[in-house]
Amino acid sequence: MENVYQSPASEVVGSEAAEYQPKVFAINGRIGRLRYIAYNMLFGIVSYVLLTVVVMIAAPMFVDVNSQAQSMSQVMKFAGLVSLPMIPYFIIFFILAKRRLNDLNNNGWLSLLSFIPFVGIFLLIYLLFWSGSKEKNNYGPKPAKNSILVILGGILAPILLIGFVGVIAAIAIPAYQDYVERVKEVAAGIQE
């Protein structure tokens, strides 16, 4: 039997407490600062690993170490091939910047300001340090609280990126020093 004195069960219309769970690969919506950092670092690490693999595979095909002069077409082909893994990263960077700007209740087209020298630095500072809207804004409800995985990603991803750059530097610096020594030997041989 139904209780006639029971309060009606309905959703509260116009509730500002609504939250949504942001998706990593979404194009629209809002993301907070920590998600912005974590997602950017995640995609940055993946892109740099792909870039490293492409360079390691492609360099022997286009660069002849024994040749004194490389043709411009070889250099351009190599540069074009190396830039391919970075195209998806830049697209994702603009999508994440758009979502972060939406969290700040700004239009996502402002992410194009990152193309302007020096202005891009101020845009990045704005995206990293200003807090987003506390409640629903023009671009949707506020994002749900960060999960443990997002918090760990936001903390560990920069550390991993610094470590990755350190490993690449540890490999590249001795190789560059060896290259400089060989060039000096060749230059000394030409002068004699």
Image (cartoon, rainbow, N blue to C red):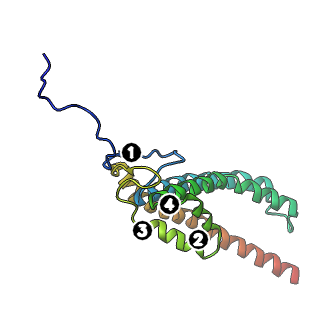
Q: Which numbered disc, 2 or 4, marks the residue closer to the eye?
A: 4
- What amino acid does circle 4 point to? Leu
**Element type at mark 3:** loop
Classify residue 20 as left or right of residue 10.
right
The residue under label 4 is 101
Whole-percent x and y of residue 39?
48, 53
Label 3 crowd bin: few (<14), some (14–19), many (20+), radius 10 Å: few
Q: In this view, does 102 lie above or below 129?
A: above
**Element type at mark 2:** helix
Q: Point out the tag, 3 or 4, that comes first from the N-terminus.
A: 4
Label 1 crowd bin: few (<14), some (14–19), many (20+), radius 10 Å: few
Q: Point out the tag, 2 or 1, that comes first from the N-terminus.
A: 1
**Residue shown at 48% from the left, 46% from the top:** 24
Q: Point out the tag, 2 or 4, that comes first from the N-terminus.
A: 4
The residue under label 2 is 120
- What amino acid does circle 2 point to? Gly
Q: Distance between the residues labelled 2 and 3?
A: 15 Å
**Residue shown at 29% from the left, 36% from the top:** 11
The residue under label 3 is 130
Classify residue 122 as left or right of residue 187.
left
* Quadrant, the N terminus: top left
Q: Do the residues labelled 2 and 4 touch (CB within 8 Å)?
A: no
Q: 173 or 44, which lies in front?
A: 44
Is any part of residue 192 visible from this angle? no
